């Protein structure tokens, strides 16, 4: 494949990317969760439900794919500021965790 068709294909694929807050929400949520683990003196693993940050990222990608399929991706925009600026308590409350 020459460069021109490849660039066109990449441009088309980029145009298909979701225009919602779910990807940034997942990034912010992963960073917040990792910070909470540090603050709580815990590490990734079975005890926290995710083997590592990649496992968390995979879970969040699946979660947001489901939201998009259900037409509920707007919930990502609601959670984004909580994960960007909130506390660990805010993080857990946003998911409805005890």
Image (cartoon, rainbow, N blue to C red):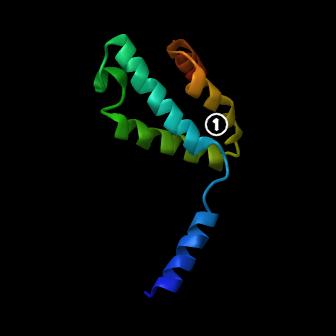
Horizontal arrangement in the rendering, residue 15 relative to residue 57 (left or right): right
Secondary structure, mark 1, is helix
**Label 1, residues with CA under 10 Å away: few <14, some 14-19, many ≥20:** some
Q: Which residue is mark 1?
A: 76
Q: Position of residue 17 (x, y in %)?
A: 60, 58
Q: Is residue 61 visible?
A: yes
Q: Quadrant of residue 50?
A: top left
Q: Quadrant of residue 8?
A: bottom right
Is 30 placed above or below 48 here? below
Is 35 placed above or below 8 here? above
Residue 95 vs residue 21, the one in the foreground: 21
**Which residue is drawn at the image coordinates 57% and 68% (left, top)?**
13
Horizontal arrangement in the rendering, residue 19 relative to residue 65 (left or right): right
**Which residue is drawn at the image coordinates 53% and 72% (left, top)?**
10
**Which residue is drawn at the image coordinates 30% and 26% (left, top)?**
44
Q: Position of residue 86 (x, y in %)?
A: 58, 19
């Amino acid at each position: 494949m020459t460069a021109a068709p490849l660039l066109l294909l990449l441009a088309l694929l980029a145009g298909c990317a979701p225009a919602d807050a779910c990807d940034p929400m997942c990034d912010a949520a992963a960073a917040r969760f990792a910070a909470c683990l540090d603050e709580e003196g815990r590490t990734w693993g079975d005890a926290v439900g995710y083997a590592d940050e990649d496992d968390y990222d995979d879970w969040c990608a699946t979660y947001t794919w489901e939201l998009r399929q259900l037409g509920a991706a707007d919930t990502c925009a609601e959670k984004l500021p909580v994960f960007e600026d909130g506390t660990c308590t805010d993080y857990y409350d946003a998911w409805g965790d005890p």
